[in-house]
Amino acid sequence: FQKFKSWTRLCIVFFSQPKKSTHWFHYWSKQRYLWWRKFSSIPSKFSMSEVKNIEKDIQQLSLLHEFPWGHEPLESITHYESRCVESLFQDFCKTNKLKFNPASPPSLIVCETKLDLAVLAYLSNSYAERWRKGKLKNILHFLF
């Protein structure tokens, strides 16, 4: 089975002080994980990957869902330390005529959700097959 490609994404960006950014990265990772599990009828199908160092100052982890064809990342949470975004922030300040303080560029925490897979995960969690009186019944149970 070919891996599912997502076309629609939702991206949330948090700005943080560099000293507290690692705390917020782990905080939002946990909150997003708990949120996915909260609305699932089968919470055990959700898991978190290990934190990976993508580049020198970029960390990322994924929230995974177990589909019939394997685990797929539904959401990725990326932590960009202040050194990564310093030049970008500097250019933004120049363009918008803002004062730039090079001593304190922000760190970024980006949560990116694949909405197509999110809907698939929600539907697959709602579907169940149950035996009743010797017959197999398909059941859709949505949890709100």
Image (spheres, rainbow, N blue to C red):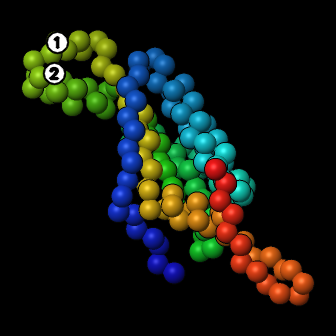
How many discs mark residues in the rendered view?
2
Residue 5, placed above or below residue 79: below
- Measured Cα–Cα span from mark 1 to mark 2: 6 Å
Q: What SS does tag 1 mark?
A: loop
Which amino acid type is shown beneath numbered disc 2?
Answer: Cys
Q: Quadrant of residue 94?
A: top left
Q: Residue at x 71, y 53 (%)?
A: 43
Foreground residue among 30 and 10: 10
Q: Which residue is mark 1?
A: 99
105, 125: nearer the viewer:
125
Q: Residue at x 51, y 58 (%)?
A: 118
Q: Is residue 61 left or right of residue 38?
A: left
Question: Foreground: 114 or 78?
Answer: 114
Q: Position of residue 62 (x, y in %)?
A: 52, 50
Q: Where is residue 105, by image quadrant?
A: top left
31 to 115, vertically: above or below: above
For mark 2, does the 10 Å Cα neighbourhood hold few (<14), some (14 to 19), or many (20 or more) residues? some
Which residue, given by chain and number where applicable, does mark 2 sit on? 93
* Image position, residue 5 (x, y; %): 40, 68
Does any portion of residue 26 appear in the rendered image? no
- Mark seen at residue 2: none
- Near mark 1 (Cα within 10 A), the count class, few <14, some 14-19 or many ≥20, is few
Q: Compared to 47, does 125 lie above or below?
A: below
Is 16 placed left or right of 22 in the picture?
Answer: left
Q: Mark 1–mark 2 contact, CB under 8 Å?
A: yes
Q: Is residue 63 visible?
A: yes
The spot of residue 124 in percent (x, y) is 62, 67
Say above or below: 9 vs 16.
below
Q: Amino acid at mark 1?
A: Lys
Please tell me whether mark 2 sits on a helix, a strand or a loop.
helix
